[in-house]
Image (cartoon, helix red, strand yellow):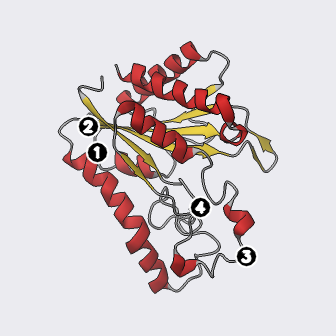
């Protein structure tokens, strides 16, 4: 597979913590919460933009907080709405889905369905270094479905290309979440066969974007260059 015989799509479901004007009163006392990993995937949009630019690939992203509705959850999932929104009247929740969730999902699906080439989809995310009493040691997680041959092969090549450039990075497969867990890539696998779609969820330890500076820029360049190499 190379950039010439596949179409690359980059998405970012949790890119920001913006609250739409209609719901600002609901979040008036949640400023601190919005700044945490619960409000957004810190650094994920910057990473997604760099991947998109490096690979000359289209980017579908959202800067609306996941606390309004989680674009990476399926309809009916218990965490589709947060504690702040799940008790809203049904009509209001349906409005949120119609205005924020469904257009995003349909845009991604339409790109894949209309592509004349096989699609490689990279969904950019990040994870908090500490969750509860669990310290997450990895720097990078590559999430995929081990049953899908093309995803398995692409994840292996991407990891190898990353470590060729930065051997000290800790890169793990299906960490800190299972690649087959509920999410946008999992939903798309249900619609598109292995031959036409390969979805990898990129997870970056948030300590990297939080540290900022030269190391964070270097990590983004490493991941983008390594993916370009893997696609060849």
Q: Which mark is residue 196?
A: 2
Label 3 secondary element: loop
Left or right, residue 90 beside residue 188: right
Label 4 secondary element: loop
Q: Up-down: is 56 above or below 39?
A: above
Select label 2 or label 4 by which is in front. Answer: 4
Measured in 3D between alpha carbons, the distance from the residue under mark 1 to the one under mark 3, in whole angstroms, is 42 Å
Measured in 3D between alpha carbons, the distance from the residue under mark 4 to the one under mark 1, in whole angstroms, is 30 Å
Label 1 secondary element: loop
Q: Which mark is residue 192?
A: 1
**Disc 4 and disc 3 in contact, CB within 8 angstroms:** no
Residue 98 can be seen in this image: yes
Q: Up-down: is 48 above or below 217?
A: below
Task: From the image, tell me which residue sits under label 3.
Answer: 29
Residue 161, image x, y percentages: 50, 18
- The 10 Å Cα crowd at callout 4, few under 14, some 14 to 19, many 20 or more, is many
**How many labels, in total?**
4
Select label 4 or label 1 by which is in front. Answer: 4
Select label 3 or label 2 by which is in front. Answer: 3
Q: Residue furthest right?
A: 133
Measured in 3D between alpha carbons, the distance from the residue under mark 4 to the one under mark 3, in whole angstroms, is 14 Å
Q: Up-down: is 67 above or below 13?
A: below
Q: Which mark is residue 17?
A: 4
Tag 2 or tag 3, which sits nearer the N-term? 3
Residue 214, image x, y percentages: 65, 29
Tag 1 or tag 4, which sits nearer the N-term? 4
């Amino acid at each position: 597979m190379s950039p010439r015989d596949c179409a690359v799509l980059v998405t970012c479901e949790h890119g920001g913590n913006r609250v739409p004007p209609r719901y600002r009163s609901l979040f008036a006392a949640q400023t601190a919460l919005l700044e945490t990993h619960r409000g957004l995937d810190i650094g994920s949009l910057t990473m997604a933009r760099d991947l998109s630019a490096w690979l000359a690939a289209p980017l579908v992203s959202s800067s609306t907080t996941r606390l309004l509705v989680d674009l990476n959850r399926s309809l009916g999932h218990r965490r589709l709405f947060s504690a702040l929104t799940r008790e809203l009247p049904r009509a209001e929740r349906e409005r949120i889905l119609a205005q924020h969730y469904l257009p995003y999902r349909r845009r991604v699906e339409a790109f894949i369905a209309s592509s004349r080439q096989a699609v490689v989809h990279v969904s950019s995310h990040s994870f908090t270094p500490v969750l509860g009493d669990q310290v997450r040691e990895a720097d990078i997680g590559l999430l995929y479905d081990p049953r899908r041959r093309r995803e398995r092969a692409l994840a292996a090549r991407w990891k190898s290309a990353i470590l060729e450039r930065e051997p000290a990075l800790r890169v793990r497969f299906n960490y800190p979440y299972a690649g087959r867990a509920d999410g946008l890539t999992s939903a798309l696998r249900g619609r598109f066969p292995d031959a036409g779609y390969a979805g990898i969820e990129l997870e970056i330890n948030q300590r990297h974007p939080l540290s900022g500076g030269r190391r964070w820029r270097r990590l983004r360049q490493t991941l983008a260059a390594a993916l370009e190499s893997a696609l060849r």
